[in-house]
Amino acid sequence: MSDNRPLRVGLYIPNGNGYMANGVYRWSDILEFARAAEEVGFDSVWVADHMLFRFPGETETLSRWECWTVLAAIAGATKRIELGPLVSCMSFRNPAHLAKITETVDEISNGRVILAVGAGWHEPEYTAYGFPFDHRASRFEEGFRLVHDLLRTGRSDFKGSFYAVEDCEVVPRGPRPNKIPLIGGTNGPRLLRITAELADGWNTDWIGTPEAIPALRIAVDAACEDVGRDPATLSRSACVYVDLPAAKGRFEREDARQPGPQSIEQIVENLHRYAAEGLSEVMIWLDPNTLQSVHEFGSILSTLDHG
């Protein structure tokens, strides 16, 4: 990241099929995206953690490759760019196992992993794969505390209603013992509170314009104040739709929140506005979501870097 860049810019990499994809993205496609993102100057790349999507009225099952397996492969195939899940679902893995996975992928990447964690939301994938859908906020709170303890100290004897470990230890440690960034990907009051208490940063899900940020920022600041934390010490990031001039508008559901095709000048202006709203990073979902778009976005990054 250039010293002149107003905020970090990450790229969401498609890792399956469905909305905004062009057929099924294979590992060869994912690898090209990751290497192109590194080449043109993105700060980070991100992979979704979902098993499948099934929506009312739709006959096709939408799916993803397993998130952490893909991240480990990206870690071994890149050199500079940071990487992480967007976001890792707490309910899909035992939290102690998640801490172990994170430490391992950080070792593979030589210290480039960012762990962003959320509570999950899509019940059909829970049902299909046999994950518990009940008490998701409580499971997140306990799991987040357990992951935090293991990544920050390497040990835990946590005992909760849903998770319990005894003399648990994460060894060996990777290149950043106790320092892997931990992000809470959430907007709910209970989840915001534990994010404010324990996390290094907060992330919100997909938005289309900077106008969505102020109300969210107020809630995050309030959560920090409730736990006695200086709000300025919690980094802020957002998942952002960026529609290039040739955008196809492939999301058709009402909650899509895509901004519609924008000029390069509008995109640059919005990135500056996101920074002015207090974001330190945006994770971008491009439309068209193609390798050509990744390379085209390199010129936008260059413009940001040169003021």
Image (cartoon, rainbow, N blue to C red):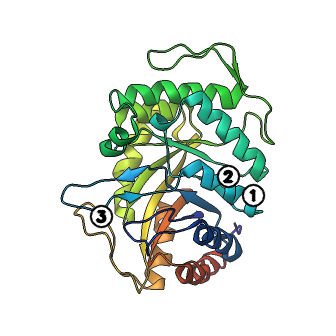
Q: Is residue 55 left or right of residue 261?
A: left
C-alpha span from label 3 to label 2: 30 Å
Q: Is residue 226 visible?
A: no
Q: Quadrant of the N terminus?
A: bottom right
Label 2 sits on residue: 72
Task: Say what secondary structure mark 3 lies in.
Answer: loop
Q: Nearer the viewer, residue 111 or 232?
A: 111
Q: Earlier in the sequence, mark 3 or mark 1?
A: 1
| Amino acid type of the residue that numbered disc 1 sits on in the rendered structure | Gly
Label 1 sits on residue: 76
The x, y position of residue 13, in whole percent, is 54, 65
C-alpha span from label 2 to label 1: 6 Å
Numbered circle sitting on residue 256:
3
Q: Is residue 206 left or right of residue 276?
A: left
Task: Say what secondary structure mark 1 lies in.
Answer: helix
Whether residues under marks 2 and 1 lie with C-beta atoms below 8 angstroms apart, the answer is: yes
Numbered circle sitting on residue 31:
none
